[in-house]
Image: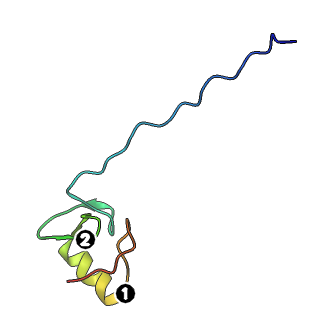
Amino acid sequence: MSDKKTPPPPVLPPMVSLKESFCLFHKGDIKGEIYTCPSCKSNYCLKCAEKAKKEGRLCVKCKYLVLI
């Protein structure tokens, strides 16, 4: 009864890292000035960050309040 085969180990997806010039608010490349989250150092377009602050939105990555 010990002839049971064990399943293969799980295959994990490759590590994904975002480009430094990628805005998580509009999901595209950053053009122009950059806003950096003081908590997690994620980068956003300054225009997107200003809009997020007006709307009371938080950093997509760490949920820190957008401060400008």
**Residue in front for this viewpoint, 7 or 21:** 7
Say which residue label 2 marks: 37
Q: Which amino acid is tagged 1?
A: Gly
Q: Above or below — where is 49 with respect to 5? A: below
Spatial CA distance of label 1 from label 2 is 14 Å
Residue positioned most to the bottom: 54
Q: Which amino acid is tagged 2?
A: Cys
* First in residue order: circle 1 vs circle 2: 2
Say which residue label 1 marks: 56
At x 69%, y 23%, the residue is: 7
Please provide percent x and percent y for residue 30: 19, 63
Few, some or many residues within 10 Å of mark 2 (<14, 14–19, 20+):
many
- The part of the image, by quadrant, that contains residue 45 is bottom left
Please provide percent x and percent y for residue 56: 37, 87
Count of numbered labels shown in the rendering: 2
- Residue 21 numbered tag: none
